[in-house]
Each structure stands twice: as structure tokens, then as C-alpha cells.
Image (tube, helix red, strand yellow):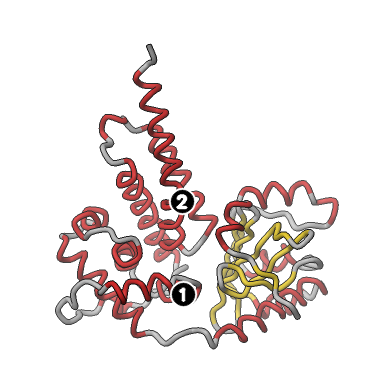
Amino acid sequence: MHDPDIRDQAWLAAEFERNRGHLHAVAYRMLGSMCEADDVVQDAWLRLGRADAGDIGNPGGWLTTVVARVCLDQLRARKQRGEEFYDPDAHAQTPADDGDATPEREAMLADAMGPALLVLLDTLAPAERLAFVLHDLFGMSFDEIAPIVDRTPVAARQLASRARRRVQGAPPAESDVPRQRRVVDAFLSASRNGDFAALLAVLDPDVVLRADVVAQMASVGKQAQGAPELANLIRGADAVARTFSGRAHAVRPALVAGAVGAAYAQDGIPRAAFAMRIAGDRIVAIEVISDPRSLAEMGVVILEH
């Protein structure tokens, strides 16, 4: 006879794997960061391991709630650090609720869930972003969302409605692509040439550099080849410029998750992607992604000169 605890653990592990892709998608759309999404999903796995299987009737819902709450905490922490592009007008009083999004509007927003929408989501308050993402993009009910944001279902609906109006009222950002390409080209050129001043000019003073675990491990093994040493988190233009100065000789401009970034490929296969968040003419965030599953999910396409 098998120990029931072992059976419960095996069932929970199987349910986690079954929901892993969904959890990562929720975390990425909440945070706009593949590295942070990986960390949140890992956190959810650790919490699941400490939970009593008898208390979890719906593992998918339980895990989604855990991921959403962790993401909400991280978004609030960003706001306190001043990292997010926060607009206080998001909290202004709004007209009566415009109702749920129609299926057509929800499909439009889901299809547009690329870099442009991620930038728009950065303008929302944390609770607004969570309510909008969970309801409009993942179909959760406001009864399920309400306890996560510590609101009533009616108030959670208002949060999503306010976010929806802001997102739908924003102009399309397709025209940003040529500008983003110029910024990325300038960054790569300055990096290859070791032009420290030019790197500083293209980096936001508060730029953030993140790297996934695979990229961090690979950088340690390639120190002798002149590869930069990558840490989980590097802040500030000076530190990021020093990391990339004299590097990137084999890195090329690329589309990363639909936005202009950069990538390193071997035999035509992307081995590392540099996802970049660009505001104005400066880079405000860089993520180095080397995990094969994440690379496949991001759809990396090397751009021709």
C-alpha cells in the first residue's frame, strides 16, 4: 500500500506541471518580465510543496491565486521603488462601470498582448493591472479576483473597467518600431566598440538588467572568452554599461516577443535573447534569456541589416 501523503504529493506535482504554462503566462503578463515570471512560478511551486493537498480542491485556481498575489506584491514593491511608469490619473474617479468587455473587445486585447500593451499596463496601478489581466486576458470572474485585491466584486469590476478604458484609449505603438531599432543599434554599436559614454547616453540612469538562471550559469563558464558576468539583478546605467562595454560582438538585432531587442544565435538557432524595454530614446530594462523553453515562448527572430 502506498503512503497517501506520497500519492497527494505526486498528484500536486502533476497538477503543477499541467498548469505551469498558464501560470507563467499569467505572471509574464502581470510583470512584463520573463525572469520575474520564472521566479514567481518557482515560488508557487515551493508554496504548493508546503500546502496540505486536502485543502486544495482546485489546484489550478489555487496556483493562479498564489501567482496573482505574489505578482501584486511585486508590482506594489516596484511602485515604492519608483520603477513603474505610474500615472496618478489612474486613480481618478471614473463614470459608472461600462460593463464587462465584449468577446470581440476581449479578443482584440488578447491579440494585442505584446510589447505595446505591456508598456500600457505599466501605466496602471497594481490592482488595476491585476484585475484587467486576470479578467480580460484570462477570463477569471470578479468573484475570484475580489479577494486577491482585497476588494468587493463590484470594486474589482471597476478596477478592470478603469484599466480597460485607459488601454483602449491609448494610440497604437507600431510607429515606435523604427525608433526602437535605432536605439538598439546604437546600444549594440557602443557595446562592441567599448564606447562607455555612448552606452551611458542610450541607457536610462535607472536601467535594470536581469538574467535568467541559465544565462547566469553560461556567463560564468564563458568568462575566459570575454563574455560579461551576469547577475540576477544589476541596477543603474554605470553598472549596466560596464557589464556590456566591449561585448556583444556576436549579438544581432532581433524581434523578441514582438519587440525590437537583440539575440545571439548558433547555426541559426537563438541561444540567448536580450529583451529590451525602451522609453523615449533610452533603454530602461534589459532581460537576458537563455532558457530554451522561454526562448521558444518568446519567438525570437534575427533581423537583417
What numbered label is drawn on residue 76?
Answer: none
Q: Is residue 177 left or right of residue 159?
A: right
- Asked whether residue 206 appears in the rendered view, the answer is no
When asked about the image quadrant of residue 154, the answer is bottom left
Q: Earlier in the sequence, mark 2 or mark 1?
A: 2
Q: Residue furthest front?
A: 104
Residue 137 or residue 207, whichever sits in front: 137
Q: Quadrant of the C terminus?
A: bottom right
Where 16 sits versus 106, above or below?
above
The 10 Å Cα crowd at callout 2, few under 14, some 14 to 19, many 20 or more, is few
Residue assigned mark 1:
119
Q: Nearer the viewer, mark 2 or mark 1?
A: 2
Calculate the distance from the C-alpha at mark 2 to the C-alpha at mark 1: 22 Å
Amino acid type of disc 2?
Gly
Which quarter of the rendering shows the N terminus? top left
Q: Position of residue 255 (x, y in %)?
A: 62, 72
Q: Could you tell me if residue 221 is visible in this image?
A: yes
Which residue type carries mark 1? Val
Query: Which residue does the numbered mark 2 point to in the structure image?
Result: 21
Which residue appears at 34% of the width and 61% of the height? 138
Q: Secondary structure at mark 1?
A: helix
Q: Residue at x 34, y 85 (%)?
A: 169
Give percent across and percent down for residue 135: 29, 63
Q: Residues within 10 Å of mark 1 (few under 14, many from 20)?
A: some
Relative to 3, residue 130 above or below: below
